[in-house]
Image: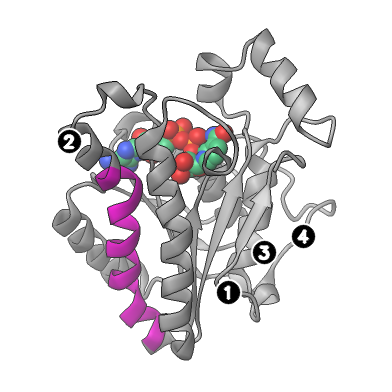
Amino acid sequence: MNGGAGVGAGRFATYPSLRDAVVLVSGGATGLGAEFVAQFAAQGARVAFVDVQEEPARELVEAVAATGAPRPLFRRADVTDLEGYRRVIGEVAGELGPVTVLVNNAAVDTRRPTAEVDVAAWDAGMRVNLDHHFVAATAVAPMMRAAGGGSIVNLGSISTHVKLRDLVVYRTAKSAVEGLTRALALELGADSIRVNCVIPGWVMTARQLRDWVDAEAEAVLDREQSLPLRVQPQDVARLLLWLAAEDSRACTGQDWVVDGGWM
Ligand SMILES: NC(=O)c1ccc[n+]([C@@H]2O[C@H](COP(=O)([O-])OP(=O)(O)OC[C@H]3O[C@@H](n4cnc5c(N)ncnc54)[C@H](O)[C@@H]3O)[C@@H](O)[C@H]2O)c1
C-alpha cells in the first residue's frame, strides 16, 4: 500500500458512486494492484482481489481493514488458469454481489531478448498479460448488464509506446490490451458497460525501486518525462477511481496515459 491514506481527506476526490460498489482487482496483493485495492476501499467500495501471493495479500487485507475501510475480500487465484479464474469471479459475485467495476491488472513483465523467447515463453507471456483480461471481462459483463452497467479498466503500458528492449512478449500483449479495450468498449457499450485502458509510465512501486530504478534509470526519467516528478502508484489509482466512477460516464474505448509526460 503506497499512499492510500489521505484519500477523500480533502486534498483528493471522493466519489459517491463508488461507495458500496463491488470492485474486482486482479493481481491486487502488491504493487499498483495493492494501491488500487486500498484506494477503492477508502472510497467505501467493497473490494475483492485475486493474486498468487498469499502473504502480502493477507497483510493488505489487515492493513486496509485497520483504516476503518470495508475489509477487502482476497481469493487466491492464478489468472493463467482461465477456467479456475472464471469460477473464482463467480464465487466473488456470490459473496459480494454483482461485480460492477473490474480492474484487469495482473501482469508479468519478464525481460528477455527476442532470440531467447521460444513458443512456450510466448504462450506463457500472452496467458499472463492478455488472455485473462478477456476471460474476466466476459465473466463480469452479464453481471454488469443485469446491474444496469459497469466499468472495466485494463492496464496497458508505456513500454508499448517507447523504445524499451527485451520485452517482445509483454509489449505485444500490452498492445493487444489496447485493442481489446476498443473492441470490448464497442460491443459492450449498448449495455452501458464502459471499457478503458490506463497506460502508466514508469511507476515507482516497491518492486520497480528494488529491481530497476538505479542512477541510470533516474537519468532516463529526468530526460524523458516533461514533469520533474516520479509517478507514484497513487497517481495511477486516482485516474482509475475516476474511470470507475460515474463522473466518467460518457468515456469509453480510450487510452488514458499517466506518465509524467513521457509519451
Ligand atoms: N510499475 C510500472 O512502472 C508499470 C508501468 C506500466 C504498466 N504497468 C502495469 O500495471 C500493472 C501493475 O504493475 P505492477 O508494477 O504493480 O506489477 P507487479 O509485478 O509489481 O505486480 C503484479 C501483481 O500481479 C500478481 N500476479 C502475477 N501473476 C499472476 C497470476 N498468474 N495470477 C494472479 N496474480 C498474478 C503478482 O503476484 C503481483 O501481486 C501491470 O498490468 C503492469 O503491466 C506497470
Nearest the viewer among 189 and 14 is 189
Task: Give the image quarter of residue 252.
Answer: bottom right
Look at discs 1 and 4 and give the one toward the viewer.
Answer: 1
Asked whether the beta carbons under mark 3 and mark 4 sit within 8 Å of each other, the answer is yes
Residue 252 is tagged as 1
**Residue for badge 4:** 13
Nearest the viewer among 138 and 93 is 138
Secondary structure of the magenta portion, mostly? helix
Secondary structure beneath label 2? helix
**Residue for badge 3:** 242
**Residue 130: within the magenta?**
yes
Cβ of mark 3 under 8 A from ligand 1:
no
Asked whether the beta carbons under mark 2 and mark 4 sit within 8 Å of each other, the answer is no
Asked whether the beta carbons under mark 3 and mark 2 sit within 8 Å of each other, the answer is no
Asked whether the beta carbons under mark 1 and mark 4 sit within 8 Å of each other, the answer is no
Highlighted magenta segment, given as a residue range: 126-145
Q: CA distance from mark 2 to mark 1?
A: 34 Å
Q: CA distance from mark 1 to mark 3?
A: 12 Å
**Residue for badge 2:** 119
Q: CA distance from mark 3 to mark 4?
A: 9 Å
Secondary structure beneath label 4? loop
Quadrant of the snapshot with the C terminus: top right
**Where does residue 31 sit, x and y in percent of width and height?**
50, 35
